[in-house]
Image (tube, helix red, strand yellow):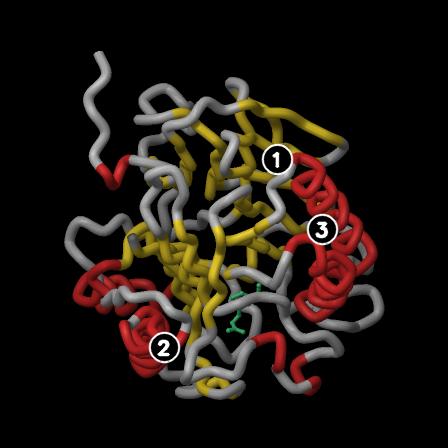
Amino acid sequence: MRQSLHASDRGLRCFFDKSLSSGVGHAAGNVLGRVHYGHGSASALDQGTPLLSVHMAGPGTDPFTEVWVTDRPVRAGARGDLLYAEDGEHIFCATRVPARDVYRDAVHEAYHEAFALIAGLGYTRPFRMWNLVGSITGGNADDMEIYQDFCVGRAKAFEEWSDRIGPMPAATGIGTLSPGIDLYFLASRDGVPQHLENPRQTPAYNYPDRYGPKSPSFARATYLRGTGGDPDTLYVSGTASIVGDDTVRHGDIAGQCEVTLANIEALIGAENLRRYGVEHGFRLTDLDHVKVYVRDAEHLPAVRARCAEAFAGHAEVAYLNVDVCRRDLLVEIEGICR
Ligand code: 3EB
């Protein structure tokens, strides 16, 4: 029996499956893709849809699966190292760059192949990306930080493709517990993404070069106007304790939580959205499907307590104990408002 859809059940949405199975069995909708934040790394078509498994759960955090579902029929496929699934309006695309000495060329190639795939299928508007980077603050074989090495390859792909796929969308760049880089993203066919910056922060793509030879390629958030009855959705990038381009509150987990939450508040509030012609405004209690990345396990209890206060009781919030892309960042938070 099929119940009528609530407005909030229309279109593309995600939920966190915290049961031990990563199966598609009880998903309320057609599965577009799954990302299992657990103990292994692998990617495959599983039960007919893409399943990316990433090593990001540790002793102090529980594995979970982020499941993307849609009310439209889904078609899945694989091409080269890419897994994808499309519903006529959205595409989910995932791939993995295995461990190597230097990442830039392989990252460029992975992004290039992914952009060629989505553009070829007509989904020319990426609106949310996740970059899950092993040893993110470690060094590559050339003694460059792996995050910076990654940023070089990603930036080149965006430079080459921006005339066909538009500007850089909201993203997360975060550490994992195994070598190699996993990436996955979502793009739309007709829904028009509006990319947002944060008045408190320098746009990441304008960071000065002391942070690396190529600036990170992402927007602070992306507001996707739905089409065909889909709700509008605001995707908030991984956000940390950065003001301007500086890390602030060094070594102070409570302080970094406050700055991070204040950054998100300023980003999603009505005043900032109005600058982009979006007549809407959100608060922290509107944030759902929140992922909280904590560098040091000892900080997990304090961060959990602060987030329990800040976010709505019904919000799905998952915690991961992984490195953040600057050694002085202790916490990073992302989420979705609709
Ligand atoms: C920052 O604001 C923190 O490289 O894709 C956040 C979100 C961060 C995305 C990325 C990096 C990325 O610079 C780090």
Question: On the rendered image, what quadrant is the N terminus found in?
Answer: top left
Mark before the other along the chain sequence, 3 or 2? 3
Residue type beneath disc 1: Ala
| Label total for image | 3
Q: Residues within 10 Å of mark 3 (few under 14, many from 20)?
A: many
Q: Tag on residue 84? A: none
Image coordinates of residue 32 in percent, x first then y, are 48, 31
Give the structural element (helix, strand or loop) at label 3.
Answer: helix
- Occupied quadrant, residue 15: top left
Q: Position of residue 212 (x, y in %)?
A: 70, 78
Residue tagged by mark 1? 42
Q: Nearer the viewer, residue 311 or 191?
A: 191
Question: Is residue 127 rendered to the left or right of residue 43?
Answer: left
- Which residue is outermost to the top? 1
Q: CA distance from mark 1 to mark 3?
A: 18 Å
Instruction: Look at discs 1 and 3 and give the one toward the viewer.
Output: 3
Residue 12 as seen in the image, left or right of residue 120: left
User: Between disc 1 and disc 2, whose residue precedes?
Assistant: 1
Residue corresponding to mark 2: 263
Q: Secondary structure at mark 1?
A: strand
Answer with the quadrant where ligand 1 appears in the image: bottom right
Residue beneath the point at 36% across and 19% down: 25
Q: Which residue is mark 3?
A: 111
Circle 2 sits in a helix, a strand or a loop, which is it? helix
The image position of residue 271, as x and y in percent, is 30, 78
Q: Amino acid at mark 3?
A: Tyr
User: Mark 2 packing: few (<14 Cα in 10 Å), some, or many (20+)?
Assistant: many
Q: Position of residue 258 (x, y in %)?
A: 29, 79
Seen at 35% across and 26% down, the residue is 29
